[in-house]
Image: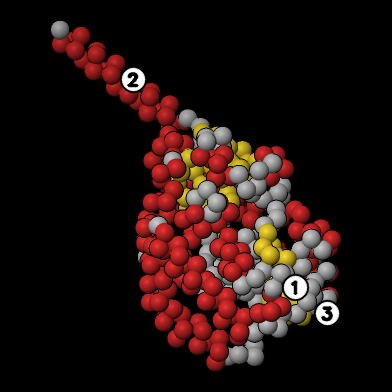
């Protein structure tokens, strides 16, 4: 009896050890769809960087199969494909999906909103992650910050913008909430996939466009067609995102979830500083090689009109939907507080050393 009992105990122990070691060896291949084209610089590098870190840190237990837009043919369909389980993960921008999930747009950037460090502080310490979860969980999705472009430029314009009148009927590519704001002040707004931007501007399908900033704009060649390069107001710190299907996430052992989480956060941070670096290099070269390129800031009356339109539309969104109101209020309150610090630190520093 005793012998039999201890034999059973040993057997149970062996079984437990075997299954633990099996699960420790199990590998998970995650299919990831990105909005970007193959070998996309910076944006696509963030995806590949995340995958490579997670593979290494997990000793190969996490594997990724990344499909770029040439493969899945749906650059703005990432949300739907990850939701449907067609892909486990996505790398895209939340505001591309304002049509199907309006409250998603606040997690990329908001016109006249927070700059990147302020927004990261809001995400991780100011309640942003919790609000993003509230928006995505009902869709069976998790969303994580996936890299920041830094402050985006207001775009490339063929003609100088001297007044609000100059915006009337102007055909411009601007996605997200900023597009709605521009519509409000009279711009004919359109969103065009990245691959068609140059030809659209060249053919005159559009008169102006905004993409990102020197880091990504330079290689697109827009400066060869439109010479006025305006500083921005619309995307003070655009964050792209990693999307994960909740079922995929739940299947992963806790340690792999943590490896994935850390890889996404590190890749996001790296994209932010890489954007800073590449923009510095690209702007320096652009000024040197294309002296016709003219930097501009929008006149105060234009900025004022855009700000009024932003406030009006945000108020309308807050009125329509309770969760929208919660997000808008959270962002506004957070900005109000953190900006006081930005003003006496970075802003005051830059003002006092201006000319460098
Ligand atoms: Ca942009």
Report the side of 38 relative to 14 (left or right): right
Q: State the residue at coordinates (79%, 73%).
A: 158
Q: Nearer the viewer, residue 19 or 272?
A: 272
Q: Nearer the viewer, mark 1 or mark 3?
A: 1
Q: Residues within 10 Å of mark 1 (few under 14, many from 20)?
A: many
Whole-angstrom CA distance, mark 2 to mark 3, is 73 Å
User: Image height check: is 99 above or below 234?
Assistant: above
Image quarter where the N terminus lies is: top left
Q: Earlier in the sequence, mark 2 or mark 3?
A: 2
Report the side of 124 relative to 115 (left or right): left
Q: Residues within 10 Å of mark 2 (few under 14, many from 20)?
A: few
Q: Secondary structure at mark 3?
A: loop
Q: State the residue at coordinates (48%, 46%).
A: 260
Residue under pointer 1: 157
Visible residue check, residue 94:
no
Q: Nearer the viewer, residue 190 or 245?
A: 190
Whole-angstrom CA distance, mark 1 to mark 3, is 13 Å
Whole-angstrom CA distance, mark 1 to mark 2, is 68 Å
Residue under pointer 3: 292
Asked whether mark 2 and ligand 1 are closer than 8 Å, the reply comes as: no
Q: State the residue at coordinates (44%, 48%).
A: 136
Res. 15 mark: 2
| Badge 1 vs badge 3, beta-carbon distance below 8 Å | no
């Amino acid at each position: 009896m005793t012998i039999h009992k201890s034999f059973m105990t040993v057997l149970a122990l062996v079984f437990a050890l075997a299954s633990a070691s099996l699960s420790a060896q199990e590998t998970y291949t995650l299919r990831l769809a990105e909005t970007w084209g193959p070998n996309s610089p910076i944006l696509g590098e963030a995806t590949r960087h995340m995958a490579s870190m997670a593979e290494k840190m997990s000793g190969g237990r996490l594997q990724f199969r990344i499909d770029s837009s040439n493969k899945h043919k749906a650059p703005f369909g990432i949300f739907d494909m990850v939701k449907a389980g067609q892909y486990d993960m996505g790398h895209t921008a939340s505001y591309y999906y304002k049509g199907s999930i309006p409250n998603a747009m606040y997690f990329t950037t908001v016109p006249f909103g927070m700059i990147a460090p302020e927004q990261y502080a809001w995400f991780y310490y100011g309640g942003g992650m919790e609000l993003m979860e509230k928006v995505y969980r009902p869709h069976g999705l998790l969303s994580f910050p996936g890299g920041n472009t830094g402050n985006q430029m207001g775009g490339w314009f063929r003609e100088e913008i001297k007044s609000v009148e100059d915006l009337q009927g102007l055909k411009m590519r601007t996605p997200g909430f900023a597009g709605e704001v521009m519509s409000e002040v009279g711009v004919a707004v359109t969103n065009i996939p990245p691959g068609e931007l140059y030809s659209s501007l060249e053919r005159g399908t559009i008169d102006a466009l905004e993409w990102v900033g020197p880091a990504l704009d330079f290689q697109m060649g827009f400066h060869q067609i439109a010479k006025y390069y305006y500083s921005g107001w619309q995307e003070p710190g655009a964050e792209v995102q990693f999307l994960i299907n909740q079922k995929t996430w739940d299947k992963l052992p806790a340690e792999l979830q943590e490896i994935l989480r850390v890889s996404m956060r590190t890749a996001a941070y790296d994209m932010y500083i890489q954007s800073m670096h590449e923009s510095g290099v690209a702007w320096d070269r652009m000024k040197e090689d294309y002296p016709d390129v003219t930097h501009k800031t929008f006149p105060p009356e234009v900025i004022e009109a855009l700000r009024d339109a932003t406030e009006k539309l945000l108020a309308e969104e807050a009125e329509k939907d309770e969760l929208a109101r919660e997000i808008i209020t959270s962002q506004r309150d957070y900005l109000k507080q953190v900006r006081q610090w930005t003003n006496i630190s970075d802003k005051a520093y830059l003002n006092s050393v201006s000319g460098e």
